[in-house]
Image: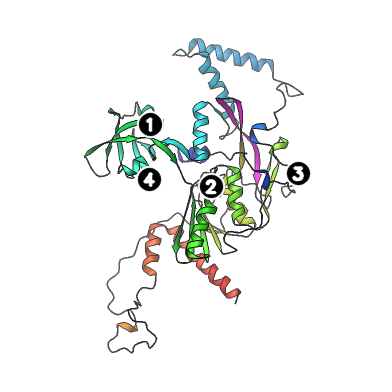
Amino acid sequence: MRLSRRSPIALLVAMPLLLTVPHAFAQTAPAPAGSLAAPPVDLPAASSSATAPARAGSGADQVDLDDIRNFSRVYEVVRQAYVEKVDNKTLMKAAITGMLSGLDPHSEYLDKDGLAQLNEDTTGQYSGLGIEVLQEDGGLRIVSPIDDTPAARAGIKAGDSIVKINGTLIDPQNVDEMFKQLRGKPGSKISLTIAHQNSDKLIDLNLVRENITISSVKVRELEPGYAYIRISQFQDDTGGDLDKKLGALIAKNGPPKGAVLDLRNNPGGLLNAAVSVSDDFLNSGIIVTTRGRLQDANMSFSAHPGDLLNGAPLIVLVNNGTASAAEIVSGALKDNHRALVMGQRTFGKGVVQTVLPLDADHAVKITTARYYTPNGTSIQAEGIKPDIALADLTVSKADSAPVLISSEADLPNHLANENAKAGNDINNDGSADDAKLATGDYALSQALNVLKGMALGKTSANR
């Protein structure tokens, strides 16, 4: 279960691009000397063993004693004069948190709960009920239940509201505390009072928490010959999950004529997962480079032979919510001329965070590098401009009067087609399915139309 209570921007930056990368992709080369189109850079060590910064106060940039005095004075003023008593531990944590948040929107201090949430985001595993929950108007609304979880088996549906947890009514004053109760050890019991959408009837459910695994990859066939790949975020197992699911689709239906890779509203995740996904569609070329002050932050990643689609046309769907690791994949496929990028300009998070442990229960997630697309371009605060721009639109089917005669076949005494097959429906030209897709997802319908054109062009070129 995951709570979405932050603003859209906060959600986008919540998933760090972490330096947890396999050496198999990295290449060693001298550090760049100024040009953005520099050669590959240095091999990383593991994120937990990154080179420590120089000791504070060394060299010319020493801490000013007046700044230390001012900090001490402010600390004492708050401790003595603040309207409510604040203990020293809380004040020190606030000071550390403020120091990191003042650097950029992505650096932060992680306590035990923060580390647990980070682990959940990057592994997709937790113990709970299998629901994504949104705080709305002081209550908890179900965004979606995950298939084959306690919530889904109990009949909880998207749009339902949680009214009570263990008999206690949810209100704006206790919503955070109540949300925490949804978590718990596997096998532990919890009771929920649910109101289904558009219903005033309350339903009591007794559930048992389980270990839940969230899959970040979904693969299906859009229509015969065209695959749809949806990646919602980049977790530890995203690369392997993509290999498995796309491989199964190809084994079942044969090699696709083309595919759509949907990265819309993907907030990012792990760097190694982004590299792995990019490599799945490339046979060669640079995927991404990273550059920072520490030697361990200077890296370059290249693709290996083995394109899962065997060169079939590929379109990447993006929007303003495509961020971080998702932008690495978009940039890698675009710069290597492997895919067309369609949609809106991406979010523009072009920096990398490394998690540096302080002790068993505390760590610092700090920005250690910028990353660059294969062309040497930084997308920080700029984003990736799509090859084909699409407005964020919804479409509806136009109302029209019934047409009695729409083709030669409707005319009385028409000559039959000598090659016509018995039972063939000439009105089934695919337009009905196209209309259904367009009204449900305009951007995806446009991507499929362009993809068909690319596939036809490739077929004609190979004749």
Q: Residue 304, how many percent across, how many down?
A: 66, 54
Residue 462 in view in this figure: yes
The answer to which quarter of the image holds residue 358 is top right
Mark 4 vs mark 3: give the one in front. Answer: 4
Image point (65%, 50%), residue name? 373
Label 2, secondary structure: give it: helix
Mark 2 vs mark 1: give the one in front. Answer: 2
Tell which circle, 4 or 3, labels the residue nearer the N-terminal end. Answer: 3
Mark 1 vs mark 3: give the one in front. Answer: 1
Residue nearer the viewer, 135 or 120: 120
Q: Residue furthest left?
A: 201
Res. 32 mark: 3
Q: Where, quadrant-wise, is the C terminus in this rendering?
A: bottom right
Tell which circle, 2 or 4, labels the residue nearer the N-terminal end. Answer: 4
Magenta residues (range): 354-383
Q: Which residue is mark 4?
A: 148
CA neighbours of label 4 inside 10 A, class few (<14), some (14 to 19), many (20+): few
CA–CA distance in space, label 2 to label 1 = 28 Å
Q: Which residue is mark 1?
A: 179
Res. 238 mark: 2
Tell which circle, 2 or 3, labels the residue nearer the N-terminal end. Answer: 3
